[in-house]
Amino acid sequence: MRKSWIAVGALTGILLTPVIRAGAPPPLSGDILGQVLGSNGVAQMGATVLLYDRYDQLVRRALSSADGKFAFDQLIPESYSIRVTLASFVPAIRRNIAVAAGSEDVLQINLTSLFSTVDLISSGPSRGTLMSDDWKWVLRSSQSTRPVLRLLPTVSSSAQSPASVFSDTTGMVTVSAGDGESFTTGSQQSMGTAFALATSLFGTSRVLFSGNVGYIGSAGLPTAGFRTTYARTRDGGSGPQVTLTVRQLYLSPRGVISGPGLGAEAGPALRTMSLSMRDSVDLSDNLRLDYGFGMESVSFIDRLNYMSPYARLSYDLGSKGVVRFGYSNGAPPLGLATESATPEQETASNGELLNQDLAALATLPRVSLNNDHVSVQRTQNFELGYQKVSGSRTYTTAVYRESVTNAAFNLSGPQGFLPVTDAMPDLGTNSAIFDVGAFNRVGYTAAVKQNVTEHIDASVAGGGTGALATGGGAQAQTGGAAGLRATIRETESPWATVSVGATVPVSGTRIVSSYGWVDPGTMMPDHYFMTGDVSQVTGWNVRLRQPLPFFPSLAGRLEATAELRNMLAAGYLPIVSASGQKALLTNAPRAVRGGLAFIF
């Protein structure tokens, strides 16, 4: 009898086992599934997928499979963020992915070279969820449970506080005045107010907005320029960067070279708009490619549209240094000098980085007139360089081949020295811009930088390249701009630059003094070095930056700045017209400027 009851009990247990499993409680975790696709819809294998919790702590890590799929299972119900990275693509990020008990969130990641996206295809409870919508309505309608069990609506990402959207915000406001500027120095105005503001957006990108407003001294009319930069971060470093710059300037009347400005009688407005993009890619462990381009439109009498591409290839030799090859065609590749930094680096040196952006805003295209037609100076540059850092010393060598068309320089002379059809009004001076034509040159340079002490650094650079001369002040044989151009010739000339910088420990005063020697009787056009940090200046220049006392309760600091350019008037090239009139041609006019900056 006992054996019979044991057999009956075992059979009953076997029959009831499926019923018990079917009635088991639903799972208390959720899943996130996804697939990574390229811009053409092809599945991407090997993409790194990082999962973060609501505190931005790394929770899981996965790699996409051959069909681009990945999965994170058994996740605790809460809000998650996901980041997907793959070489040659912009990282894709999505925040506030709500995972409920028993739910499955399906994502589709579309990676592109400019703007990557993460789309939520479906987000809902899977079979066997802990609570259905019917039970939620029951709890809401129950008087006994309403005070305790209240369902609140989910807060969307658009309702985030501004503090969580913007972070690491820095800014600067400067007021400057002094001698008038020139197109040839790349400055924007003789007196005005400039500002720059940088902030981090959602911790994944950087937005920088700067502007410069004021009055041109020789025209008496307002001028303005604005620049906006958007940069994405990539694996903690800089990513793609897009910049939009617009400017509007009112110049002196056409044909006026000397004499006071004529106020409201100023000439037509010069308007420029440019859109530029820069990015970088690691081709291998030691090989890196930085590339970009700029599209610019210039409107002054005529309208010109042109493109300026550039690229730089760097091969890292480890302790033996870095070899670089650069190419540019058009405007100077300022994107290589103003590459985006991480938010931490920008916070540490926000003043320098904001000043770089203001300098890029002030760098105008070198516009000139040639037979009453507007021309823009364009430069084609092939450059090969080598750089090595040995302790506190940096060695740099470079060789380049440069071709310049519509070269524009500052010309100071009596009124009527140039025909109206070839006299482009200068920006903030009483001079004009003269188109000397085209020239080709080959140059080489070597430089050494040394940190002497913690507060003193020095550099020495020198080399040889093509310069412009007039052959002992030769007089133009024929009148007009063509005759003046015929007197200018190319010649090989050496150059040397010595620079010393010092910081006073107690007061924080920063002084940088440099002297650039060029062969007397020649004018040395500047060269924009792409493969190394080489300083090439003309004459004696001094820059002074002095921190000032400020209210301790206010977050920020004041700085006074002063700048003296080419105080010895070096590099002035005399030219004589067919009628015997004399003028001076230069790319580095003397100037004294000062300003006050508030940095926060």
Image: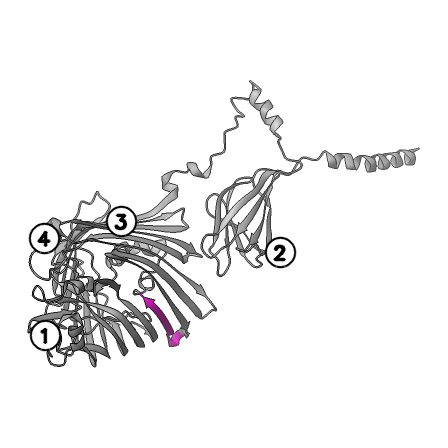
Closer mark to the observer between disc 2 and disc 3:
2
Mark 2 or mark 4: name the one nearer the start of the chain: 2
Mark 3 or mark 1: name the one nearer the start of the chain: 3
Quarter of the view holding residue 443: bottom left
**Does the stretch in magenta take in 329?**
yes
Q: Residues within 10 Å of mark 1 (few under 14, many from 20)?
A: some
Provide residue 577's location: percent of width, then percent of height.
Answer: 10, 73
How far, Cα to Cα, is label 2 from label 4? 70 Å
Do the numbered discs 1 and 2 sit on residues whose CB atoms are within 8 Å?
no
- Residue sitting nearer the eye, 504 or 242: 242
How far, Cα to Cα, is label 3 from label 4? 36 Å
How far, Cα to Cα, is label 1 from label 2? 77 Å
The residue singled out by tag 1 in the image is: 578
Identify the residue at horizontal 35%, vertical 53% (top origin). 343
- Looking at the rendered structure, the kind of residue marked 4 is Leu
Mark 4 element type: loop
Q: Residues within 10 Å of mark 3 (few under 14, many from 20)?
A: some
- As drawn, the label of residue 67 is 2
Q: Residues within 10 Å of mark 4 (few under 14, many from 20)?
A: some
Task: Judge left or right: residue 578 versus residue 326.
Answer: left
Closer mark to the observer between disc 2 and disc 4:
4
Provide residue 208's location: percent of width, then percent of height.
Answer: 32, 51
Mark 2 or mark 3: name the one nearer the start of the chain: 2
Relative to 571, say whether 131 is above or below: above
- Looking at the rendered structure, the kind of residue marked 2 is Asp
Q: How would you classify the magenta stretch by its main secondary structure?
A: strand
Quarter of the view holding residue 510: bottom left
- As drawn, the label of residue 171 is 3
**Does the stretch in magenta take in 249?**
no
